[in-house]
């Protein structure tokens, strides 16, 4: 494993640390200036998640309610029917979402009927004029190509945390496995959606390490979800205290400064965040949220709460181009 010091990178870990730890007003001011230069700071993309294959996952990700290793009350289900998922996509579009993200609790994609059906879902979502994103676990080169041919906009595959902390949260795969899948996604010409989770018991240095890895991907990810851990009873992280809102805003501001063109997504964990905390994240450069009552298995603020939040902030839901 290359040490932190020997990895030749365009952005050094020290530079990331300096940004992350700068005085909060300066950090947010800098992030806001960069955000304004590249994006409309009043617009927030609304996205909808669908759990197309719930639970029973063989991986042991310590944060995840869908892992078969933990007793969380989530049963392993079969892949949802294509028509059901496309019905959800239509409803999401009617509710104002411009991106539909489908998640499967798989360790990896296997060729066969299930994958063929996922390809149909991707085609269907694209025909509705929405961006389509999927997260299906590990992927090989030919599977990535088939997803591209079906019209997939982006593939979500998170690094979750720093390389150093990763083995403390997952033992059934490695950081390099993740990077490999991301390489296949990129090689197929699909946009990369890659981010992480805060509040798992990692140190600030781990958060800095994650952002450093993301910013040094070449090309950088087009989409960077920053999740606050949703602690779920039965998982090893069921009793974690929520990440501090200022720390969350620091991470988002740093992501925005390092990756000016990326869509930075204020992803899981909004149910536990006050409106003020979310507003701070928008100031720091977040420009996307997941809407609807549910993420994959955990609660999310409903569409009426989010409409009220946008109204209060004088911000608007981004519409399709
Ligand atoms: N199985 C696929 C994989 O891991 O790549 C896709 C589904 S997985 C649920 C997608 C992402 O959701 C994970 O990479 C993780 O970052 C995030 N996630 C899962 N459980 C979470 C939780 N309790 N709180 C916050 N984020 C979570
Ligand atoms: C991502 O980074 N966050 C979303 C999406 N990618 C798939 C998922 C969050 C899941 C939160 C836990 C749950 O609802 O099960
Ligand atoms: Fe499985 Fe993905 Fe959950 Fe890990 S995060 S246990 S790979 S569904």
Image (tube, rainbow, N blue to C red):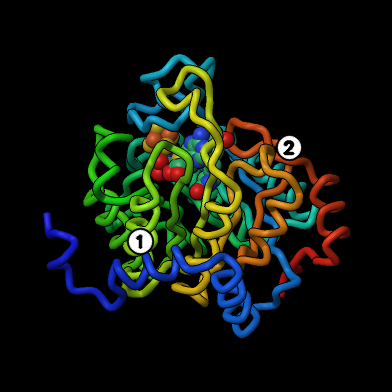
Q: Quadrant of the C terminus?
A: bottom right
Question: Is residue 136 rendered to the left or right of residue 174?
Answer: right
Q: Position of residue 153 (x, y in %)?
A: 52, 64
Q: Which residue is mark 2?
A: 293
Q: Which residue is mark 1?
A: 185
What element does badge 2 sit on? loop
**Residue at horizontal 65 percent and vertical 40 percent from the top:** 83
**Residue at horizontal 44 percent and vertical 27 percent from the top:** 237
Quadrant in the picture for residue 186: bottom left
Q: Position of residue 88 (x, y in %)?
A: 70, 43
Q: Quadrant of the N terminus?
A: bottom left
Question: 205 or 141: which is nearer to us?
Answer: 205
Q: Position of residue 232 (x, y in %)?
A: 53, 25
Q: Nearer the viewer, mark 2 or mark 1?
A: 2
Quadrant in the picture for residue 296: top right
Distance of mark 2 from mark 1, alpha carbons?
Answer: 30 Å
Question: Is residue 215 rendered to the left or right of residue 269?
Answer: left
Question: 152 or 6: which is nearer to us?
Answer: 6
**Residue at horizontal 52 percent and vertical 38 percent from the top:** 229
- Residue placed farthest to the bottom in the image? 37
Task: Point out the tag, 2 or 1, that comes first from the N-terminus.
Answer: 1
Question: 211 or 158: which is nearer to us?
Answer: 211
In the rendered view, tell whether residue 299 sits above or below residue 159: above
**Residue at horizontal 82 percent and vertical 59 percent from the top:** 310
């Amino acid at each position: 494993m290359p040490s932190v010091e020997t990895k030749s990178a365009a952005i050094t870990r020290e530079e990331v640390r300096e940004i992350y730890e700068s005085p909060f007003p300066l950090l947010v001011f800098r992030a806001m200036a960069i955000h304004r230069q590249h994006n409309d700071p009043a617009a927030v993309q609304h996205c909808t998640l669908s759990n197309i294959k719930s639970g029973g996952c063989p991986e042991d990700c310590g944060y995840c309610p869908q892992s078969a290793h933990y007793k969380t009350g989530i049963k392993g289900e079969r892949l949802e029917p294509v028509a059901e998922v496309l019905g959800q996509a239509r409803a999401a579009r009617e509710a104002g979402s411009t991106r539909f993200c489908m998640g499967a609790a798989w360790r990896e994609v296997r060729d066969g009927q299930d994958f063929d059906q996922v390809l149909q879902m991707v085609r269907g979502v694209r025909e509705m004029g929405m961006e389509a994103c999927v997260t299906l676990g590990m992927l090989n080169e030919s599977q990535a190509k088939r997803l591209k041919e079906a019209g997939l906009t982006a593939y979500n595959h998170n690094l979750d945390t720093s390389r150093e902390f990763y083995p403390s949260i997952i033992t059934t795969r490695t950081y390099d496995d993740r990077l490999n899948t991301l390489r296949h996604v990129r090689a197929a010409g699909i946009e990369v959606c890659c981010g992480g989770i805060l509040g798992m018991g990692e140190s600030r240095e781990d958060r800095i390490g994650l952002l450093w890895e993301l910013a040094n991907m070449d090309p950088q990810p087009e989409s960077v979800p920053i999740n606050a851990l949703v602690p779920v009873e039965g998982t090893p992280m069921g009793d974690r205290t929520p990440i501090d809102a200022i720390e969350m805003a620091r991470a988002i501001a740093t992501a925005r400064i390092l990756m000016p063109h990326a869509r930075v997504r204020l992803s899981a964990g909004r149910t536990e965040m006050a409106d003020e905390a979310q507003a701070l994240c928008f100031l720091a450069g977040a420009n996307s949220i997941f809407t609807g009552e549910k993420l994959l298995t955990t609660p999310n603020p409903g569409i009426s709460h989010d409409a009220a939040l946008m109204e209060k902030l004088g911000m608007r839901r981004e519409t399709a181009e």
